[in-house]
Amino acid sequence: MNLIIVTACPQGVATRFLAARALERAAHRRGWSVTTDTRGPDGKAESQPDAEAIKKADLVIAAVGVPVDLEVYAGKRLLQIPVTAALPDPDSILDRAQAEAESWDPTTGSAAPTASGETAAAAKRIVAVTACPTGVAHTFMAAEALTVAAQSDGHEIRVETQGSVGAQDPLTDEEIVAADVVVLACDIEVDPSRFAGKRVWRTSTGAALKKPAETIRDALAEAVVLEAGKQKAASVAGSGEKRGPYKHLLTGVSFMLPMVVAGGLLIALSFVFGIDAFQEEGSLAAALMQIGGGTAFKLMIPLLAGYIAWSIADRPGLAPGMIGGFLAGELGAGFLGGIVAGFLAGYVARFISQKLPMPESIESLKPILIIPLLASLVTGLGMIYVIGEPMAAIMGALTGFLEGMGTTNAILLGGILGAMMCFDLGGPVNKAAYTFGVGLLSEGSGGSAPMAAIMAAGMVPAIGMGVASFIARRKFAEAERQAGRASFVLGLCFISEGAIPFMAKDPLRVIPVCMIGGAITGALSMLFTVKLMAPHGGLFVLAIPNAVSAVLPYLIAIAVGSLVIGFGYALLKTGKAEVTAAVS
Protein backbone atom coordinates (compact mmCIF):
# COMPACT_ATOMS: atom_id res chain seq x y z
CA MET A 1 0.00 0.00 0.00
CA ASN A 2 1.38 3.40 -1.04
CA LEU A 3 0.10 6.14 1.28
CA ILE A 4 0.44 9.94 1.05
CA ILE A 5 -0.12 11.92 4.25
CA VAL A 6 -1.07 15.60 3.89
CA THR A 7 -0.85 17.67 7.09
CA ALA A 8 -1.47 21.36 7.82
CA CYS A 9 -2.27 23.43 10.90
CA PRO A 10 -3.07 27.12 11.29
CA GLN A 11 -0.09 28.66 13.06
CA GLY A 12 3.03 26.53 12.90
CA VAL A 13 4.84 23.21 12.94
CA ALA A 14 4.04 21.29 16.10
CA THR A 15 0.57 19.85 15.43
CA ARG A 16 1.11 18.99 11.78
CA PHE A 17 4.42 17.33 12.67
CA LEU A 18 2.88 15.22 15.44
CA ALA A 19 -0.07 14.19 13.24
CA ALA A 20 2.20 13.21 10.35
CA ARG A 21 4.50 11.27 12.63
CA ALA A 22 1.63 9.38 14.31
CA LEU A 23 0.11 8.30 11.01
CA GLU A 24 3.50 7.49 9.54
CA ARG A 25 4.49 5.17 12.37
CA ALA A 26 1.14 3.38 12.25
CA ALA A 27 1.48 2.89 8.49
CA HIS A 28 5.03 1.57 8.76
CA ARG A 29 3.89 -1.04 11.26
CA ARG A 30 1.64 -2.35 8.51
CA GLY A 31 4.48 -2.39 6.00
CA TRP A 32 3.07 0.50 3.95
CA SER A 33 5.22 2.91 1.96
CA VAL A 34 4.63 6.48 3.13
CA THR A 35 5.21 9.89 1.57
CA THR A 36 4.43 13.13 3.42
CA ASP A 37 3.04 16.37 2.03
CA THR A 38 3.43 19.13 4.62
CA ARG A 39 1.60 22.41 4.20
CA GLY A 40 2.18 25.80 5.80
CA PRO A 41 -0.36 27.85 7.77
CA ASP A 42 -1.57 29.31 4.47
CA GLY A 43 -2.27 25.83 3.08
CA LYS A 44 0.48 26.03 0.48
CA ALA A 45 2.73 23.00 -0.10
CA GLU A 46 6.21 23.02 1.44
CA SER A 47 7.37 19.49 0.51
CA GLN A 48 4.90 18.13 -2.02
CA PRO A 49 5.49 14.63 -3.45
CA ASP A 50 6.63 14.39 -7.03
CA ALA A 51 4.34 13.31 -9.87
CA GLU A 52 5.61 9.72 -9.78
CA ALA A 53 4.81 9.31 -6.07
CA ILE A 54 1.33 10.75 -6.58
CA LYS A 55 0.73 8.42 -9.52
CA LYS A 56 1.68 5.36 -7.44
CA ALA A 57 -0.38 6.41 -4.39
CA ASP A 58 -3.19 4.01 -3.46
CA LEU A 59 -4.54 6.16 -0.65
CA VAL A 60 -4.31 9.79 0.55
CA ILE A 61 -5.08 10.99 4.07
CA ALA A 62 -5.44 14.77 4.44
CA ALA A 63 -5.18 15.68 8.13
CA VAL A 64 -5.63 19.45 7.95
CA GLY A 65 -6.83 22.34 10.08
CA VAL A 66 -6.81 25.03 7.36
CA PRO A 67 -8.15 25.17 3.79
CA VAL A 68 -5.72 23.41 1.45
CA ASP A 69 -5.57 22.85 -2.30
CA LEU A 70 -5.79 19.12 -3.00
CA GLU A 71 -6.22 19.38 -6.75
CA VAL A 72 -3.05 17.33 -7.41
CA TYR A 73 -4.81 14.34 -5.85
CA ALA A 74 -7.81 14.45 -8.20
CA GLY A 75 -9.05 10.92 -8.84
CA LYS A 76 -7.17 9.45 -5.87
CA ARG A 77 -8.93 7.72 -2.98
CA LEU A 78 -8.79 10.40 -0.29
CA LEU A 79 -10.00 10.75 3.29
CA GLN A 80 -10.08 14.21 4.83
CA ILE A 81 -9.97 14.57 8.64
CA PRO A 82 -9.17 17.30 11.21
CA VAL A 83 -5.46 17.41 11.98
CA THR A 84 -5.97 16.64 15.68
CA ALA A 85 -8.05 13.55 14.87
CA ALA A 86 -4.87 11.73 13.80
CA LEU A 87 -3.22 11.98 17.22
CA PRO A 88 -5.26 9.78 19.63
CA ASP A 89 -5.63 6.61 17.51
CA PRO A 90 -3.80 6.72 14.16
CA ASP A 91 -4.45 3.01 13.49
CA SER A 92 -8.20 3.59 13.48
CA ILE A 93 -7.69 6.44 11.01
CA LEU A 94 -5.87 4.08 8.65
CA ASP A 95 -8.71 1.55 8.95
CA ARG A 96 -11.23 4.27 8.32
CA ALA A 97 -9.28 5.52 5.30
CA GLN A 98 -9.25 2.05 3.75
CA ALA A 99 -13.00 1.70 4.30
CA GLU A 100 -14.30 5.20 3.61
CA ALA A 101 -11.87 6.99 1.28
CA GLU A 102 -13.48 8.03 -2.00
CA SER A 103 -12.18 9.32 -5.31
CA TRP A 104 -11.35 12.99 -4.83
CA ASP A 105 -13.11 15.50 -7.06
CA PRO A 106 -11.65 18.99 -6.51
CA THR A 107 -14.62 20.62 -8.22
CA THR A 108 -17.06 19.36 -5.59
CA GLY A 109 -14.91 18.42 -2.61
CA SER A 110 -14.40 20.77 0.32
CA ALA A 111 -10.86 21.99 0.86
CA ALA A 112 -11.32 22.27 4.59
CA PRO A 113 -12.39 19.53 6.99
CA THR A 114 -16.19 19.65 7.38
CA ALA A 115 -18.03 18.95 10.59
CA SER A 116 -20.91 16.53 10.82
CA GLY A 117 -24.44 17.89 10.82
CA GLU A 118 -24.63 17.35 14.58
CA THR A 119 -21.36 19.19 15.19
CA ALA A 120 -22.27 22.02 12.84
CA ALA A 121 -25.55 22.48 14.66
CA ALA A 122 -23.69 22.69 17.98
CA ALA A 123 -20.93 24.98 16.68
CA LYS A 124 -19.95 27.68 19.17
CA ARG A 125 -18.12 30.97 18.98
CA ILE A 126 -15.03 30.96 21.18
CA VAL A 127 -12.59 33.72 22.01
CA ALA A 128 -9.35 33.03 23.84
CA VAL A 129 -6.31 34.78 25.29
CA THR A 130 -2.93 33.09 25.69
CA ALA A 131 -0.03 34.51 27.71
CA CYS A 132 3.14 33.15 29.32
CA PRO A 133 5.78 34.90 31.46
CA THR A 134 8.26 35.62 28.64
CA GLY A 135 5.58 35.89 25.96
CA VAL A 136 7.58 34.03 23.34
CA ALA A 137 6.95 30.33 22.75
CA HIS A 138 4.16 28.87 24.92
CA THR A 139 1.94 31.86 24.13
CA PHE A 140 1.85 31.14 20.40
CA MET A 141 2.03 27.33 20.57
CA ALA A 142 -1.00 27.26 22.89
CA ALA A 143 -2.85 29.60 20.53
CA GLU A 144 -2.15 27.26 17.62
CA ALA A 145 -3.26 24.18 19.53
CA LEU A 146 -6.54 25.79 20.65
CA THR A 147 -7.26 27.02 17.13
CA VAL A 148 -6.74 23.59 15.60
CA ALA A 149 -8.79 21.81 18.29
CA ALA A 150 -11.73 24.23 18.08
CA GLN A 151 -11.84 24.23 14.29
CA SER A 152 -11.60 20.44 14.22
CA ASP A 153 -14.77 20.26 16.33
CA GLY A 154 -16.53 22.71 14.03
CA HIS A 155 -16.33 25.74 16.32
CA GLU A 156 -15.39 29.28 15.37
CA ILE A 157 -12.46 30.65 17.41
CA ARG A 158 -10.39 33.82 17.68
CA VAL A 159 -7.25 33.87 19.82
CA GLU A 160 -5.49 36.95 21.16
CA THR A 161 -1.82 36.35 21.99
CA GLN A 162 -0.33 38.55 24.70
CA GLY A 163 3.31 38.05 23.78
CA SER A 164 6.52 39.87 24.59
CA VAL A 165 5.45 42.89 22.51
CA GLY A 166 1.96 43.09 24.00
CA ALA A 167 -1.38 41.98 22.64
CA GLN A 168 -1.27 40.84 19.03
CA ASP A 169 -4.44 40.64 16.95
CA PRO A 170 -6.50 41.85 19.94
CA LEU A 171 -10.09 40.77 20.34
CA THR A 172 -12.69 43.35 19.36
CA ASP A 173 -15.67 44.30 21.49
CA GLU A 174 -17.97 42.79 18.86
CA GLU A 175 -16.16 39.43 18.97
CA ILE A 176 -16.34 39.33 22.76
CA VAL A 177 -20.05 40.15 22.76
CA ALA A 178 -20.76 37.43 20.19
CA ALA A 179 -18.68 34.76 21.97
CA ASP A 180 -20.36 31.84 23.72
CA VAL A 181 -17.33 31.22 25.94
CA VAL A 182 -13.98 32.83 26.79
CA VAL A 183 -10.86 30.71 27.33
CA LEU A 184 -8.02 32.36 29.31
CA ALA A 185 -4.98 30.11 28.81
CA CYS A 186 -2.56 32.24 30.79
CA ASP A 187 0.40 31.54 33.08
CA ILE A 188 0.35 35.15 34.21
CA GLU A 189 -2.51 37.32 35.36
CA VAL A 190 -4.33 39.23 32.60
CA ASP A 191 -7.05 41.82 33.07
CA PRO A 192 -10.36 39.95 32.64
CA SER A 193 -12.65 42.96 33.17
CA ARG A 194 -13.61 43.20 29.47
CA PHE A 195 -15.10 39.69 29.73
CA ALA A 196 -17.50 40.59 32.55
CA GLY A 197 -20.84 38.92 31.94
CA LYS A 198 -19.35 36.21 29.69
CA ARG A 199 -18.77 32.54 30.52
CA VAL A 200 -15.03 32.28 31.30
CA TRP A 201 -12.75 29.25 31.61
CA ARG A 202 -9.24 29.64 33.02
CA THR A 203 -6.37 27.28 32.32
CA SER A 204 -2.62 27.34 31.70
CA THR A 205 -0.75 27.51 28.40
CA GLY A 206 0.72 24.10 29.18
CA ALA A 207 -2.71 22.50 29.52
CA ALA A 208 -3.94 24.21 26.36
CA LEU A 209 -0.87 23.04 24.47
CA LYS A 210 -0.93 19.43 25.63
CA LYS A 211 -4.70 18.85 25.81
CA PRO A 212 -6.34 21.44 23.55
CA ALA A 213 -9.42 19.39 22.63
CA GLU A 214 -10.09 18.60 26.29
CA THR A 215 -9.61 22.28 27.16
CA ILE A 216 -12.22 23.33 24.59
CA ARG A 217 -14.69 20.70 25.80
CA ASP A 218 -14.19 21.63 29.46
CA ALA A 219 -14.59 25.33 28.67
CA LEU A 220 -17.88 24.76 26.84
CA ALA A 221 -19.21 22.50 29.58
CA GLU A 222 -17.94 24.08 32.80
CA ALA A 223 -17.17 27.78 32.22
CA VAL A 224 -18.97 30.14 34.62
CA VAL A 225 -20.17 33.69 34.20
CA LEU A 226 -17.65 36.32 35.31
CA GLU A 227 -19.40 38.94 37.40
CA ALA A 228 -18.52 42.58 36.85
CA GLY A 229 -16.30 43.96 39.60
CA LYS A 230 -15.51 40.47 40.97
CA GLN A 231 -12.91 39.31 38.49
CA LYS A 232 -10.35 38.23 41.07
CA ALA A 233 -12.88 36.83 43.51
CA ALA A 234 -14.50 34.67 40.87
CA SER A 235 -11.32 33.50 39.30
CA VAL A 236 -11.25 30.16 41.08
CA ALA A 237 -14.65 29.24 39.70
CA GLY A 238 -14.71 28.22 36.08
CA SER A 239 -11.10 27.20 36.25
CA GLY A 240 -9.16 24.24 34.98
CA GLU A 241 -6.04 25.27 36.85
CA LYS A 242 -4.84 25.92 40.35
CA ARG A 243 -4.16 29.61 40.75
CA GLY A 244 -1.81 30.32 43.60
CA PRO A 245 1.61 31.65 44.58
CA TYR A 246 3.34 30.18 41.52
CA LYS A 247 1.18 32.09 39.06
CA HIS A 248 1.37 35.30 41.08
CA LEU A 249 5.16 35.04 41.14
CA LEU A 250 5.33 34.46 37.38
CA THR A 251 3.14 37.51 36.81
CA GLY A 252 5.59 39.66 38.75
CA VAL A 253 8.58 38.20 36.92
CA SER A 254 6.86 38.80 33.57
CA PHE A 255 6.44 42.52 34.24
CA MET A 256 9.95 42.81 35.69
CA LEU A 257 11.74 41.17 32.74
CA PRO A 258 11.75 44.16 30.33
CA MET A 259 13.28 46.31 33.07
CA VAL A 260 15.97 43.70 33.73
CA VAL A 261 16.81 43.44 30.04
CA ALA A 262 16.91 47.20 29.46
CA GLY A 263 18.88 47.93 32.62
CA GLY A 264 21.42 45.15 32.11
CA LEU A 265 22.15 46.05 28.50
CA LEU A 266 22.44 49.78 29.27
CA ILE A 267 25.00 48.97 31.95
CA ALA A 268 26.84 46.76 29.47
CA LEU A 269 26.93 49.63 26.96
CA SER A 270 28.41 51.94 29.60
CA PHE A 271 31.34 49.51 29.88
CA VAL A 272 32.17 50.03 26.19
CA PHE A 273 33.96 53.23 27.22
CA GLY A 274 35.93 51.39 29.90
CA ILE A 275 35.04 49.47 33.03
CA ASP A 276 35.45 52.55 35.24
CA ALA A 277 34.44 55.18 32.66
CA PHE A 278 31.04 55.73 34.31
CA GLN A 279 32.78 57.28 37.31
CA GLU A 280 33.57 60.39 35.25
CA GLU A 281 30.68 62.78 35.86
CA GLY A 282 28.96 64.21 32.81
CA SER A 283 30.25 61.49 30.46
CA LEU A 284 28.03 59.35 28.25
CA ALA A 285 29.17 56.28 30.19
CA ALA A 286 27.98 57.91 33.42
CA ALA A 287 24.62 58.72 31.83
CA LEU A 288 24.17 55.14 30.62
CA MET A 289 25.06 53.79 34.06
CA GLN A 290 22.62 56.20 35.68
CA ILE A 291 19.82 55.08 33.39
CA GLY A 292 20.59 51.37 33.66
CA GLY A 293 22.03 50.88 37.14
CA GLY A 294 20.71 53.96 38.90
CA THR A 295 17.15 53.84 37.60
CA ALA A 296 16.17 50.63 35.79
CA PHE A 297 17.75 48.30 38.34
CA LYS A 298 16.15 50.24 41.21
CA LEU A 299 12.73 49.80 39.63
CA MET A 300 13.07 46.03 39.17
CA ILE A 301 12.13 44.97 42.69
CA PRO A 302 9.23 47.45 43.03
CA LEU A 303 7.85 46.15 39.72
CA LEU A 304 8.24 42.54 40.85
CA ALA A 305 6.50 43.14 44.17
CA GLY A 306 3.86 45.46 42.71
CA TYR A 307 2.68 43.05 40.05
CA ILE A 308 2.73 40.07 42.41
CA ALA A 309 0.32 42.07 44.56
CA TRP A 310 -1.66 43.12 41.46
CA SER A 311 -2.05 39.48 40.45
CA ILE A 312 -3.45 38.68 43.91
CA ALA A 313 -5.65 41.71 44.63
CA ASP A 314 -6.07 43.54 41.31
CA ARG A 315 -5.28 47.25 41.05
CA PRO A 316 -5.71 48.07 44.77
CA GLY A 317 -2.70 45.85 45.46
CA LEU A 318 -0.37 47.62 43.04
CA ALA A 319 0.55 50.65 45.18
CA PRO A 320 1.26 48.78 48.44
CA GLY A 321 3.17 46.12 46.49
CA MET A 322 5.45 48.68 44.83
CA ILE A 323 5.98 50.50 48.13
CA GLY A 324 6.96 47.23 49.80
CA GLY A 325 9.25 46.35 46.88
CA PHE A 326 11.00 49.72 47.02
CA LEU A 327 11.52 49.32 50.76
CA ALA A 328 12.98 45.85 50.13
CA GLY A 329 15.55 47.40 47.82
CA GLU A 330 16.36 50.21 50.26
CA LEU A 331 16.72 47.82 53.19
CA GLY A 332 18.99 45.44 51.27
CA ALA A 333 16.43 42.65 51.31
CA GLY A 334 16.83 42.21 47.54
CA PHE A 335 14.53 40.26 45.29
CA LEU A 336 13.65 37.77 48.05
CA GLY A 337 12.40 40.63 50.18
CA GLY A 338 10.54 41.98 47.14
CA ILE A 339 8.78 38.65 46.65
CA VAL A 340 7.73 38.56 50.32
CA ALA A 341 6.58 42.20 50.14
CA GLY A 342 4.51 41.49 47.03
CA PHE A 343 2.70 38.56 48.60
CA LEU A 344 2.18 40.42 51.87
CA ALA A 345 0.75 43.48 50.12
CA GLY A 346 -1.44 41.40 47.83
CA TYR A 347 -2.99 39.21 50.48
CA VAL A 348 -3.50 42.13 52.88
CA ALA A 349 -5.19 44.15 50.13
CA ARG A 350 -7.38 41.18 49.17
CA PHE A 351 -8.32 40.58 52.80
CA ILE A 352 -9.38 44.20 53.23
CA SER A 353 -11.32 44.09 49.97
CA GLN A 354 -13.21 40.89 50.68
CA LYS A 355 -13.39 40.54 54.47
CA LEU A 356 -13.44 44.06 55.93
CA PRO A 357 -17.05 45.36 55.96
CA MET A 358 -17.59 49.05 55.30
CA PRO A 359 -20.65 51.28 55.45
CA GLU A 360 -22.25 51.67 52.03
CA SER A 361 -21.52 55.39 52.10
CA ILE A 362 -17.76 54.82 51.97
CA GLU A 363 -17.67 51.46 50.13
CA SER A 364 -16.82 53.25 46.87
CA LEU A 365 -13.68 54.69 48.51
CA LYS A 366 -12.28 51.22 49.21
CA PRO A 367 -10.28 50.65 46.02
CA ILE A 368 -8.82 54.15 45.71
CA LEU A 369 -8.28 55.19 49.32
CA ILE A 370 -8.88 52.64 52.08
CA ILE A 371 -7.24 49.54 50.59
CA PRO A 372 -4.08 51.28 49.28
CA LEU A 373 -3.68 53.21 52.56
CA LEU A 374 -4.15 50.32 54.98
CA ALA A 375 -2.30 47.77 52.83
CA SER A 376 0.62 50.16 52.31
CA LEU A 377 0.75 50.85 56.05
CA VAL A 378 0.78 47.15 56.98
CA THR A 379 3.27 46.25 54.25
CA GLY A 380 5.61 49.17 54.94
CA LEU A 381 5.70 48.67 58.69
CA GLY A 382 6.10 44.94 58.23
CA MET A 383 9.06 45.42 55.89
CA ILE A 384 10.77 47.95 58.18
CA TYR A 385 10.27 46.30 61.55
CA VAL A 386 9.82 42.58 60.80
CA ILE A 387 10.77 41.33 57.35
CA GLY A 388 13.48 43.65 56.02
CA GLU A 389 16.35 42.76 58.33
CA PRO A 390 16.01 38.93 58.15
CA MET A 391 15.60 39.05 54.35
CA ALA A 392 18.65 41.30 54.07
CA ALA A 393 20.66 38.78 56.11
CA ILE A 394 19.51 35.92 53.86
CA MET A 395 20.37 37.87 50.71
CA GLY A 396 23.75 38.79 52.16
CA ALA A 397 24.49 35.15 52.94
CA LEU A 398 23.36 34.05 49.46
CA THR A 399 25.44 36.72 47.74
CA GLY A 400 28.46 35.89 49.89
CA PHE A 401 28.11 32.20 49.07
CA LEU A 402 27.92 32.84 45.33
CA GLU A 403 30.88 35.22 45.38
CA GLY A 404 33.05 33.01 47.55
CA MET A 405 32.19 29.52 46.35
CA GLY A 406 34.99 27.40 44.99
CA THR A 407 35.22 25.83 41.57
CA THR A 408 33.57 22.58 42.66
CA ASN A 409 30.52 24.30 44.14
CA ALA A 410 30.23 26.58 41.10
CA ILE A 411 30.27 23.61 38.72
CA LEU A 412 27.71 21.78 40.86
CA LEU A 413 25.38 24.80 40.97
CA GLY A 414 25.70 25.31 37.21
CA GLY A 415 24.96 21.64 36.58
CA ILE A 416 21.87 21.68 38.77
CA LEU A 417 20.50 24.87 37.21
CA GLY A 418 21.26 23.56 33.72
CA ALA A 419 19.45 20.28 34.33
CA MET A 420 16.44 22.15 35.77
CA MET A 421 16.23 24.31 32.65
CA CYS A 422 16.03 21.20 30.46
CA PHE A 423 13.69 19.08 32.57
CA ASP A 424 10.32 20.41 31.39
CA LEU A 425 11.17 23.10 28.80
CA GLY A 426 9.14 26.06 30.00
CA GLY A 427 7.33 24.21 32.81
CA PRO A 428 7.42 24.90 36.57
CA VAL A 429 10.94 23.51 37.16
CA ASN A 430 12.34 25.47 34.22
CA LYS A 431 10.62 28.66 35.40
CA ALA A 432 11.88 28.18 38.98
CA ALA A 433 15.49 28.08 37.78
CA TYR A 434 14.92 31.04 35.46
CA THR A 435 13.30 33.15 38.20
CA PHE A 436 16.25 32.42 40.49
CA GLY A 437 18.67 33.66 37.82
CA VAL A 438 16.69 36.81 37.07
CA GLY A 439 16.49 37.61 40.78
CA LEU A 440 20.26 37.33 41.17
CA LEU A 441 20.79 39.47 38.08
CA SER A 442 18.75 42.25 39.67
CA GLU A 443 21.06 42.34 42.69
CA GLY A 444 24.06 44.00 41.08
CA SER A 445 25.43 45.81 38.04
CA GLY A 446 28.29 43.40 37.35
CA GLY A 447 26.29 40.65 35.71
CA SER A 448 25.31 37.22 36.96
CA ALA A 449 27.18 33.95 36.50
CA PRO A 450 24.13 31.78 37.37
CA MET A 451 22.05 33.73 34.82
CA ALA A 452 24.66 33.00 32.15
CA ALA A 453 24.56 29.29 32.98
CA ILE A 454 20.76 29.30 32.94
CA MET A 455 20.44 30.97 29.54
CA ALA A 456 23.12 28.78 27.96
CA ALA A 457 21.49 25.60 29.29
CA GLY A 458 18.08 26.77 28.11
CA MET A 459 19.39 27.11 24.56
CA VAL A 460 20.93 23.67 24.08
CA PRO A 461 17.84 21.38 24.00
CA ALA A 462 16.36 23.06 20.94
CA ILE A 463 19.76 23.43 19.24
CA GLY A 464 20.58 19.80 20.05
CA MET A 465 17.37 18.51 18.48
CA GLY A 466 18.24 20.43 15.33
CA VAL A 467 21.73 18.90 15.33
CA ALA A 468 20.32 15.40 15.82
CA SER A 469 17.86 15.77 12.94
CA PHE A 470 20.75 16.84 10.69
CA ILE A 471 23.42 14.25 11.55
CA ALA A 472 20.97 11.31 11.67
CA ARG A 473 18.68 12.30 8.82
CA ARG A 474 17.67 8.72 8.01
CA LYS A 475 16.19 8.32 11.49
CA PHE A 476 13.92 11.33 11.07
CA ALA A 477 10.92 11.77 8.82
CA GLU A 478 10.77 14.85 6.60
CA ALA A 479 8.34 16.56 8.97
CA GLU A 480 10.76 15.93 11.85
CA ARG A 481 13.67 17.34 9.89
CA GLN A 482 11.67 20.49 9.23
CA ALA A 483 10.83 20.70 12.92
CA GLY A 484 14.54 20.21 13.65
CA ARG A 485 15.50 23.18 11.50
CA ALA A 486 12.92 25.36 13.24
CA SER A 487 14.08 24.06 16.63
CA PHE A 488 17.70 24.97 15.85
CA VAL A 489 16.79 28.59 15.10
CA LEU A 490 14.56 28.84 18.18
CA GLY A 491 17.38 27.49 20.32
CA LEU A 492 19.73 30.21 19.13
CA CYS A 493 17.13 32.71 20.35
CA PHE A 494 16.91 31.03 23.79
CA ILE A 495 13.47 29.55 23.14
CA SER A 496 13.70 26.12 24.75
CA GLU A 497 10.20 25.20 23.62
CA GLY A 498 11.50 24.47 20.12
CA ALA A 499 12.32 20.99 21.43
CA ILE A 500 8.79 20.33 22.74
CA PRO A 501 7.58 18.41 19.63
CA PHE A 502 10.49 15.98 20.06
CA MET A 503 9.91 15.70 23.82
CA ALA A 504 6.20 15.08 23.34
CA LYS A 505 6.88 12.26 20.91
CA ASP A 506 9.82 10.58 22.65
CA PRO A 507 10.06 11.84 26.26
CA LEU A 508 11.96 8.86 27.73
CA ARG A 509 14.92 9.53 25.44
CA VAL A 510 14.71 13.30 24.89
CA ILE A 511 14.37 14.45 28.52
CA PRO A 512 17.40 12.57 29.97
CA VAL A 513 19.63 13.51 27.02
CA CYS A 514 18.60 17.17 27.27
CA MET A 515 19.17 17.24 31.04
CA ILE A 516 22.67 15.79 30.62
CA GLY A 517 23.55 18.30 27.89
CA GLY A 518 22.05 21.19 29.88
CA ALA A 519 23.93 20.18 33.04
CA ILE A 520 27.21 20.05 31.10
CA THR A 521 26.59 23.47 29.56
CA GLY A 522 25.63 25.04 32.89
CA ALA A 523 28.65 23.52 34.62
CA LEU A 524 31.04 24.71 31.90
CA SER A 525 29.59 28.22 31.97
CA MET A 526 30.16 28.42 35.73
CA LEU A 527 33.62 26.86 35.36
CA PHE A 528 34.56 29.59 32.86
CA THR A 529 33.07 32.23 35.27
CA VAL A 530 31.02 33.75 32.46
CA LYS A 531 28.74 36.58 33.57
CA LEU A 532 25.65 37.81 31.71
CA MET A 533 24.05 41.23 31.84
CA ALA A 534 20.65 40.34 30.30
CA PRO A 535 18.23 37.49 31.06
CA HIS A 536 17.13 36.81 27.49
CA GLY A 537 18.10 37.15 23.84
CA GLY A 538 20.17 34.05 23.16
CA LEU A 539 23.21 34.40 20.94
CA PHE A 540 22.03 37.80 19.75
CA VAL A 541 23.01 39.28 23.13
CA LEU A 542 26.62 38.48 22.24
CA ALA A 543 26.51 41.21 19.60
CA ILE A 544 26.17 43.82 22.37
CA PRO A 545 29.58 44.79 23.76
CA ASN A 546 30.19 43.59 27.34
CA ALA A 547 26.77 41.95 27.64
CA VAL A 548 28.69 38.67 28.12
CA SER A 549 31.93 38.78 30.07
CA ALA A 550 33.69 35.99 28.13
CA VAL A 551 32.19 35.36 24.70
CA LEU A 552 34.41 32.52 23.41
CA PRO A 553 34.17 30.31 26.53
CA TYR A 554 30.42 30.93 26.55
CA LEU A 555 30.11 29.76 22.95
CA ILE A 556 32.19 26.69 23.79
CA ALA A 557 29.88 25.80 26.68
CA ILE A 558 26.80 26.13 24.44
CA ALA A 559 28.41 24.18 21.59
CA VAL A 560 29.51 21.31 23.84
CA GLY A 561 26.09 20.89 25.40
CA SER A 562 24.35 21.11 22.03
CA LEU A 563 26.63 18.47 20.50
CA VAL A 564 26.17 16.16 23.49
CA ILE A 565 22.40 16.37 23.06
CA GLY A 566 22.56 16.14 19.26
CA PHE A 567 24.86 13.12 19.05
CA GLY A 568 23.31 11.51 22.13
CA TYR A 569 19.80 11.61 20.77
CA ALA A 570 20.96 10.61 17.28
CA LEU A 571 22.46 7.45 18.81
CA LEU A 572 19.49 6.65 21.02
CA LYS A 573 16.69 7.37 18.57
CA THR A 574 15.10 4.47 16.76
CA GLY A 575 13.26 4.64 13.46
CA LYS A 576 15.84 3.86 10.76
CA ALA A 577 13.72 1.06 9.29
CA GLU A 578 10.66 3.30 9.20
CA VAL A 579 12.39 6.05 7.27
CA THR A 580 13.84 3.51 4.87
CA ALA A 581 10.34 2.27 4.18
CA ALA A 582 9.19 5.81 3.56
CA VAL A 583 11.91 6.37 0.99
CA SER A 584 11.37 3.13 -0.90
Image (spheres, grey):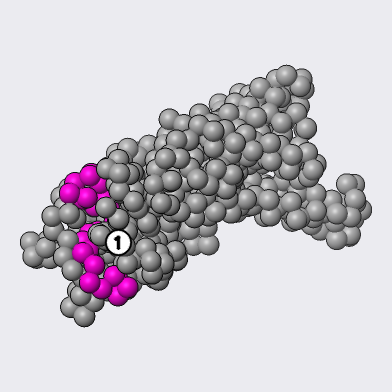
Relative image position of residue 2 (x, y in whole percent): 30, 55
Residue 153, located in which quarter of the rendered image? bottom left
Q: In the rendered image, which residue does mark 1 sit on?
A: 57
Q: Is residue 123 visible to the viewer in this orientation of the structure?
A: no
The quadrant holding residue 446 is: top right
Q: Residue at x 79, y 43 (%)?
A: 552
Residues in magenta, as a range: 70-95
Q: Is residue 274 magenta?
A: no
The answer to whether 112 appears left or right of 571 in the picture is left
Closer-to-camera residue (445/184): 184
| Residue 476 placement, left or right of 401 | left
Where residue 56 appears, as percent x and y from the top left, is 31, 62
Residue 549 percent across, percent down from the top left = 79, 42
What residue appears at the point 32 percent right and 37 percent down from the top-left corner?
Answer: 242
Element under label 1?
loop
Return the residue nearer the eye: 286 or 362: 286
| Visible residue check, residue 569 | yes
Percent across and percent down for residue 116 are 11, 63
The three-letter amino acid code for the residue at tag 1 is: Ala
Q: Decide: is 522 above or below 259.
A: above
Query: Does residue 61 lie above or below 32 as drawn?
Result: below
Judge whether residue 92 is colored magenta.
yes
Outermost bottom residue = 107
